[in-house]
Image (cartoon, coloured by chain):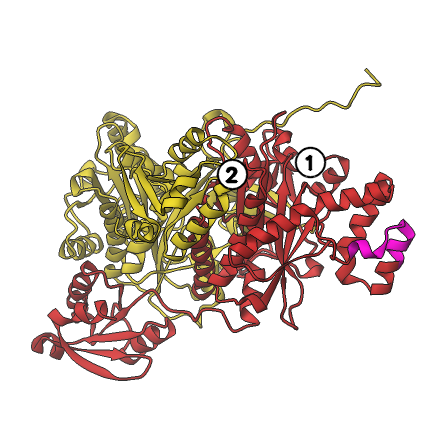
Chain colours: A red, B yellow
């Protein structure tokens, strides 16, 4: 084989394992998601920021050896050729805390920030889980008030409403880290037992009631402390503010703890109420010490993150996904290549008026050009041929219902602008 | 020291080397850039797609051993825990070629696609160059015509116009790979000498005229073949179509070759004409064989990429950068914390009407709340105090000129909607 041609093996067209390609219809959903989030976040005075997906690995390892293991096993972390350890960010909160700390004196408070970053996590392929997603992050820095906690939750609520969801579609469960810490103190739990209690609460919805109750009994924590009847003052203040803001589906649930992480106060999770999708959709809470990683005087914060796949499933299960609509208004087909310059001139006139127009270059016969317009979900077609040019009259064909109406060249733009 | 507290060293707030943080004003520029590009691309019938920044490393190595070295040295490439070699994409064209190949039969042609990806390259830190940027990519697949070449160039032209640039601000130089190949054949150049010729042409603007001419003489290529007077037919056809489309600043320049890469036909580069920024801004061209990496029947393509930092400098040098404008219309300050519920109620009314409102939670005195509004560039301030609530009259203060006018609570929304 030594004299043979080198192998011309073809490359796979598959994307890298666990990541997604966004063809136009997929990207259109992402863009709809992003636009809706942006509109609502801005309505509440939030301003967009961004950062690179590359962060120093130390940003995620700072919380101790346990965390270092987590970073090494569950993130994309590698050493660059300058010897720097770098991580593809798995979450945005450390980044925004870093950015706020960096300009702590220049930024005014309360500071409202949002971003829609791409995030990465290392998942073993066999799990079939995604290794990247897009996540809206909304954060409010510099306010200690329960009104700030309530505002963050209300932003989450209004975004779901803006997607077309109703209150019956989801419930917002509020927990309190202060309540759990007070309970642990009351029950004289050791630090290890407190950790066990938090773990047990975190698993509450995934285990049998009996197992949950046995776990509580073993720790010596009375069950009635966790039935949600005694609402702690911090949670009640948030619930009252939410109610005044028209949020009618928020409740206290002491089992909402959101792991140990960096939360310090009121935490919340939004649950889907759909029978086929009954699970926590996303959540957030108060983290008053996170910027202490960078500076002795921390800037208090509260925020949430909401991932794109969660929203997709939440909307899909309810038939709330928006129908795809092509950004192109009109397709100009040509009878022969000779009419391309005419089509380009007409396209130029339409574009100058603000109409989005694609032109076919006439390399295929007309029937195939029309198929292209249909494949691209373009709603209207105009054929540019010798007859049309001579008469100055062009048919605008509605590709959705097959109707066609004649228009003079001068009338074309007005037709599309009136849609 | 063994009994001391563990070191509580603070983390740096700096971003990873060579990447950028986008604070609100920086992000606002990016968003302006993206929005302008989207508007123009859609005007020409292009549809947005996206993909992950993670790609199989083989996608970039496919072009041979030289390229493999380039990939290893100039990209972020690492091996994941599943043994897969993965690259942070340095350019988008291989990705879009992969995606188009994957669905080659489902997609209609001509196929117009655009994306605004984040791209990564490994630069040695001492150079001070960025390791990531955002780049508009516009590509047209499935047309062999010069009209397609012209359209891609016209999209680039219209985007610069949409940014406020005039024709005198830039010049579009067209080259032709076919012309250079024909010239090489005419001069009986070896493959190696052809490569030398392309390299010499690529460096033309960076070296002395005498060096350039000596290089040509050494290769036996007549200088008059490269003065741009004999316009090849493919370039002339593109220039004619551009002229018909109103593009008055496109010229033939045989020295435009855009390296060896994957270009096969007409190529182009947009040059800044400003005396302080005279350089190639961006470019593109025809690549008819790229999808042959994936399939024996390639889908022809033509496209360009335009980076965010290039646009920034192009606009900055001309004073064309848009002024920052906060997305928040009004800041509600409170006389004391007691008025926060009233402020929230007013904010709710304004938001329901479509006004973007930030509320201060009253943790600082009024003067400091106003400073916050000013720091955030919010144009209008409304103070909510006991007097205002009792009288039902609120002053809307213009923070830019200091004027203030009284409005009833019911009139507030109308004021902002009329702006």
Report how many numbered discs are placed on residues in the image: 2
**Where residue B82 sits: x, y (%)?**
69, 51
Q: Which residue is mark 2?
A: B337
Mark 2, secondary structure of its residue = helix
Does A280 appear above or below A198?
Answer: below
What span is colored magenta in the figure? A214-226
Does residue A48 show up magenta in the picture? no
Q: Residue at x 58, y 46 (%)?
A: A149
**Where residue B180 sits: x, y (%)?**
28, 46
Residue A61's tag is 1
Q: Label 2: chain?
A: B
Q: Residues within 10 Å of mark 2 (few under 14, many from 20)?
A: some
Q: Quadrant of the N terminus of chain B?
A: top right
* Residue A207 visible here: yes
Residue A371's tag is none
Q: Is residue B94 left or right of residue B230?
A: right
Q: Is residue A108 left or right of residue A63?
A: left
Taking the view exactly as shown, the residue that stands out farthest to the top is: B1
Q: Residue at x 80, y 53 (%)?
A: A225
């Amino acid at each position: 084989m030594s004299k043979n041609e080198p192998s011309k093996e073809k490359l796979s067209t598959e994307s890298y394992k666990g990541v997604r390609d966004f063809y136009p219809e997929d990207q259109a959903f992402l863009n709809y998601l992003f636009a809706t989030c942006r509109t609502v976040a801005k309505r509440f005075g939030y301003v967009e920021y961004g950062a690179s997906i590359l962060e120093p690995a130390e940003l995620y390892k700072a919380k101790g050896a346990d965390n270092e293991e987590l970073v090494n096993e569950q993130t994309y972390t590698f050493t660059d050729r300058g010897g720097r350890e770098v991580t593809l960010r798995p979450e945005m909160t450390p980044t925004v805390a870093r950015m706020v700390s960096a300009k702590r004196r220049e930024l005014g408070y309360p500071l409202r920030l949002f971003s829609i970053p791409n995030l990465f996590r290392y998942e073993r392929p066999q799990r079939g889980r995604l290794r990247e997603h897009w996540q809206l992050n909304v954060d409010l820095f510099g306010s200690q008030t329960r009104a700030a906690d309530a505002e963050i939750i209300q932003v989450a609520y209004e975004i779901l409403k803006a997607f077309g969801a109703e209150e019956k579609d989801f419930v917002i469960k509020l927990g309190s880290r202060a309540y759990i810490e007070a309970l642990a103190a009351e029950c004289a739990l050791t630090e290890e037992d407190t950790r066990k209690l938090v773990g047990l609460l975190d698993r509450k919805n995934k285990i049998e009631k009996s197992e949950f109750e046995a776990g509580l009994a073993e720790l010596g924590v009375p069950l009635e402390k966790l039935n949600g009847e005694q609402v702690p003052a911090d949670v009640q203040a948030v619930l009252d503010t939410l109610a005044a803001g028209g949020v009618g589906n928020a409740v206290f649930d002491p089992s909402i703890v959101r792991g140990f992480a960096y939360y310090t106060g009121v935490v919340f999770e939004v649950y889907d109420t759909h029978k086929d999708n009954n699970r926590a959709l996303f959540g957030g809470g108060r983290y008053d010490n996170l910027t202490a990683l960078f500076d002795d005087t921390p800037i208090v914060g509260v925020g949430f993150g909401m991932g794109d796949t969660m929203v997709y499933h939440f909307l899909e299960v309810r038939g709330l996904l928006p129908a795809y609509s092509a950004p192109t208004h009109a397709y100009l087909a040509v009878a022969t290549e000779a009419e391309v310059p005419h089509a380009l001139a007409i396209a130029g006139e339409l574009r100058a008026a603000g109409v989005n127009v694609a032109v076919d270059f006439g390399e295929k016969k007309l029937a195939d050009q029309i198929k292209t317009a249909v494949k691209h979900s373009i709603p209207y077609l105009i054929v540019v041929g010798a007859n049309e040019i001579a008469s100055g009259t062009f048919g605008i064909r509605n590709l959705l219902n097959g109707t066609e109406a004649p228009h003079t060249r001068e009338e074309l733009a007005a037709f599309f602008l009136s849609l």
